[in-house]
Image (spheres, rainbow, N blue to C red):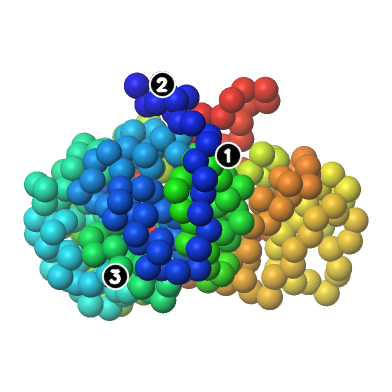
């Protein structure tokens, strides 16, 4: 069914570009979907209790219906509209990390529509810290469900231009902000069980989560086991180009047809069609998805990505690099989501 509705989306909407959070919120309040910046990546929002509007998100993105959305709130009081219960672990995480790049999974309140959570009895909730996002969410006057504002299967957008590239003519409005600060999607932590489980690594690190709930663990799906975070089984984060992870610059094959991204070295990254050397892991994370898109625009065939140490933000960065390198489309086939 999803498929048919994707095809009927008329790519003929006039997408309004605005810098005004209030103006963007007016579109949302009328039941239109709106892309907006957050500190992680741009999101594509609709009011959480508006099922037809939420359907438009799935249609605009070409997103599989079994992938649940995160609800974004502007104040703590909105938690009770969404969650049946705020578990003790979630309370601690919220006290310490909201607003910020953290999503907590909680038992869902009955009023949250199934389409928002893909039929799950849990809901993901996050309060962004980005000032424009906060102003937008306040003006919306309702929690806003929002996945990343990319076409399904493409890297998450970190600039408004990337949103426009993917969704122009398919959504009503883009709230135009700057490049996002973190560059990778939020940390997702399931707080419904005995032990909090990190389903998706992000800028709030496992180490940081453990400072408030020491038992927190990374969730490692067993092979073939149903992904606990349904989105994690879908193709994600990948550019069109082939992504190859290398230990260092010397592991990359220089060519005009290749790209390289990694940490700054004494040796210059010459001989690549596209190259990006970053000061540290934070900058690497911030620039990665943009670099992927830049390489695709330049027609690069292979992107070499230098691996980083898996601690702190390095865990999230390596997670995205692995996904991008493992989930390559088979040539000539339309990508699935
Ligand atoms: O930083 C972010 O989280 C961005 C910005 C826009 O907030 N949003 C984002 O949304 O990355 P999306 O839809 O691209 O990724 C949401 C992830 C998916 O992996 C999804 O499966 C998982 O969160 N998720 C959402 N609700 C869930 C739930 N109830 N249980 C388990 N996983 C859930
Ligand atoms: Mg996404």
Per the image, label 1 sits on a secondary structure element best described as helix
Q: Which residue is mark 3?
A: 138
For this view, does 13 lie left or right of residue 112? right
**Above or below, comparing residue 81 to residue 127 in the picture:** above
Q: Mark 2 to mark 1: distance in Å? A: 29 Å
Q: Is residue 237 visible?
A: no
At label 2, counting other C-alpha atoms closer than 10 Å, the crowd grade (few under 14, some 14-19, many 20 or more) is: few
Q: Dot 1: few (<14), some (14–19), or many (≥20) neighbours within 10 Å?
A: some
Q: Helix, strand or loop at disc 3?
A: helix
Point out the tag, 1 or 3, that comes first from the N-terminus: 3
SS type, badge 2: helix
Mark 2 and mark 3 lie on one chain; the one further toward the N terminus is 2
Q: Is residue 332 left or right of residue 209?
A: right
The percent position of residue 263, horizontal first and vertical second, equals 70, 68
Q: Report which residue position mark 2 lands on.
A: 4
Place of residue 112 in the rendered image (x, y in percent of width and height, measured from the top left):
16, 48
Name the residue rendered at 64%, 74% in the picture.
280
Looking at the picture, tell me which residue is in the foreground, 9 or 276: 9
Please tell me whether mark 2 or mark 1 is closer to you in this view. Answer: 2
Question: Where residue 60 is drawn, which disc sits there?
Answer: none
Q: Marks 2 and 3, how far apart in space?
A: 35 Å
Of badges 1 and 3, the one in the foreground is 3
Q: Which residue is mark 1?
A: 326
**Residue found at x 80% / y 55%:** 274
Residue under the image location 37 percent in, 55 percent down: 27
């Amino acid at each position: 069914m999803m498929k048919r509705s994707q095809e009927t989306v008329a790519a003929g909407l006039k997408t309004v570009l605005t810098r005004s959070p209030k103006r963007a919120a007016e579109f949302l309040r009328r039941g239109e979907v709106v892309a907006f910046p957050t500190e992680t990546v741009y999101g594509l929002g609709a009011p959480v209790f508006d099922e037809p509007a939420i359907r438009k998100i799935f249609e605009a993105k070409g997103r599989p219906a079994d992938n649940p959305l995160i609800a974004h709130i502007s104040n703590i009081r909105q938690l009770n509209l969404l969650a049946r219960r705020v578990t003790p672990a979630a309370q601690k995480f919220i006290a310490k990390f909201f607003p910020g790049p953290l999503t907590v999974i909680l038992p869902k309140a009955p009023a949250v529509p199934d389409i928002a959570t893909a039929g799950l009895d849990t809901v993901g909730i996050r309060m962004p810290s980005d000032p424009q996002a906060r102003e937008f969410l306040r003006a919306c006057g309702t929690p806003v469900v929002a996945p990343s504002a990319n076409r399904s299967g493409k890297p998450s957008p970190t600039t408004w231009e990337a949103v426009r590239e993917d969704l122009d003519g398919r959504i009503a409005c883009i709230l135009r902000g700057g490049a996002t600060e973190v560059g990778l999607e939020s940390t997702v932590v399931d707080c419904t069980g005995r032990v909090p489980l990190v389903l998706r690594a992000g800028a709030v690190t496992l180490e940081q989560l453990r400072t408030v709930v020491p038992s927190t663990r990374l969730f490692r799906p067993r092979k073939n086991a149903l992904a606990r975070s349904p989105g994690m089984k879908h193709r994600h984060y990948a550019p069109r180009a082939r992504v190859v992870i290398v230990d260092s610059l010397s592991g990359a094959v220089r060519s005009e047809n290749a790209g390289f991204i990694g940490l700054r070295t004494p040796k210059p990254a010459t001989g690549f069609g596209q190259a990006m050397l970053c000061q540290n892991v934070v900058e690497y994370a911030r620039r990665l998805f943009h670099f992927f898109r830049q390489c695709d625009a330049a027609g690069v065939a292979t992107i070499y990505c230098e691996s980083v140490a898996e601690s702190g933000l390095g865990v999230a960065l390596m997670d995205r690099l692995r996904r991008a390198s493992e989930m390559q489309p088979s040539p000539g086939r339309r990508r699935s989501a």
